Image (cartoon, grey):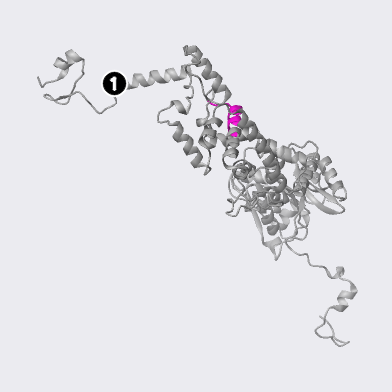
Amino acid sequence: MASGYILNRGALTLGIHCQRVCRNISVTQVREKKRWMRAYTYLMEKKLKLEGPPPPKPRSQLPNWDYHAEVQAFSNRLHENFSLELLKTAFINPCYLQAEQERRRGLGVDSEAAALVLKDNIQLSSTGAALTKSFLTDWCRASFPSLPSEGVEGIVGHLTSLTVVAHVARNLGVEDLTMSAECPVPDDVIHHTFMAVIGALEKSSGVERTGYFLRDFLATQLIGKDLFDIWTVVNPMGLLVEELTKRNIALPEPRLIRAAGASTVLPLYFVGLYSDKKLLAQGPGETLVAAEEEAARVALRKIYGYTENRRPSDFSPPQQHQQPLITSVSSN
Amino acid sequence: MDGLQVGLQFLFTGLNPLQQILHCVLQWATFARSWFVIDARMQPPGKIATMCSVRLQGKHKPIYHAMSDCGDHVVVINTKQIAFSGNKWEQKVYSSHSGYPGGFKQVTAAQLHHKDPKAIVKLAVYGMLPRNLHRRTMMQRLHIFADDELPEDIQANLTEELPQPREIPRKLSEYTQEEIDAFPRLWTPPEDYKMK
């Protein structure tokens, strides 16, 4: 009986394979890689190659998910006092409501017996977006007093653009909490949801706290970025001439300062702009035209106070005695 | 090179993916190759050669790395008028072997210079560059001219003239009479004193 092999009772009835250790001892459970493992692994890889990676599942459908706890954690993580009903409303998108209605109709659920008592976030989103735009415009004007309105619009447009807001929202965990029809959540939906969250914050904690929130999460996206990457200016020289005429400074004259390898395929020119025989700015370029344009851009950056070595913006936490956020000339 | 100082400001900030145009421009300025010109008139060829080798390797730049190919071009003019110190014109020997038996040749610096006025500077720089495969490329970036005349394309490429390593002493004929008179005398010889 103890001599295993396939003549075992268990082997015949239950189909258990036994492995012999020595003549009298056999084991059913062995520590090695199982015989079926390789075939299974290859089959799964083949399937992956044929069908591609599995579609992403929303976090709410993965295990260990408690919506209420997550919403509270969201509020605590940001050190903000959200009213939880407003916050939950802020995460509900109209596309989700429509998808949910259709699903219920498809399942044949009576729309009166199990009514969908959920409100949209459209109103919160519009208030949030308006507040964001106005706050960021004011903050920009206060930080860069010499920047013209087109520049301010360009910066605010960049900060409230789909890519930047979606990037911030995804990294704050808004994507997991959003209720939307598709997964992964598209950029415009997450933008909409983030604005709704801002609207909810405004209603819960007031305009000032929302201001600090926007400054800390959206305005910081400007760090390390150059002005003319955000705000496209087609004719920097024309703009410079306008700025100088406004300030009654002599018009700029371009002069070649340095040149290297002019007859090679990799030339470099440094052009300086002089107004009234004093150097305004100098810039490098591949050709003379490019160098002059770059010099004009450098001059504009100096005039608008958006150089790399400017005093950094003030992102310190709000003081206890509630100083107003947007004082003039906070950074220059 | 000014491009380096302007361009380096971007190297130590954190680079963002959106910071494209400024980054491109500053990178172009930082890594551009400059063209230096050195006047070798009345200069010791060794000192000229050290200056050339430093700039050919790119060791004058803070972004130097041996594998970065960051060397610049150097143009040496007036090599016909280089000035060895001491008795090197007669005592310094340049040896070569043709590879065939009996082909060992030794020439003095004066003879070599007479035969080819560019050779002394060229051999000096060659000996000062690192002994690796980059040496030949660096020698191709060295342009030596025996006299003042440069071809137009090289003339157009030049960026900077380097200061000469040795201060050329003035000949007596180049001093004005006032300077000669103003020079302090140790003693005035009597009128019938015979100078040797």
* Coordinates of residue A220 in the picture (x, y in percent): 62, 44
Q: Which residues are magenta?
A: A184-194
Residue that extends furthest to the left in the rendered view of this protein: A1
Query: Circle 1 sits in a helix, a strand or a loop, which is it?
Result: helix
Amino acid type assigned to the residue bearing label 1 in the image:
Arg
**A121 is higher (above) or lower (below) than B187:** above
Does residue A161 belong to the magenta stretch? Answer: no
Q: Main secondary structure of the magenta part?
A: helix
Query: Which quadrant, please, contains the N terminus of chain A?
Result: top left
Does residue A186 belong to the magenta stretch? Answer: yes
**A148 is higher (above) or lower (below) than A119:** below
> Residue A197 versus residue A191: which sits nearer the camera?
A197
* Coordinates of residue B162 in the picture (x, y in percent): 75, 56
Q: Which residue is mark 1?
A: A35
Instruction: Tell me if B34 is positioned left or right of A181 in this view.
Output: right
* Coordinates of residue A49 in the picture (x, y in percent): 46, 19
* Coordinates of residue B91 in the picture (x, y in percent): 67, 62
Answer few, some or many: residues within 10 Å of disc 1's Cα (few below 14, many 20 plus, some between 14 and 19). Answer: few
Seen at 81% across and 53% down, the residue is A279
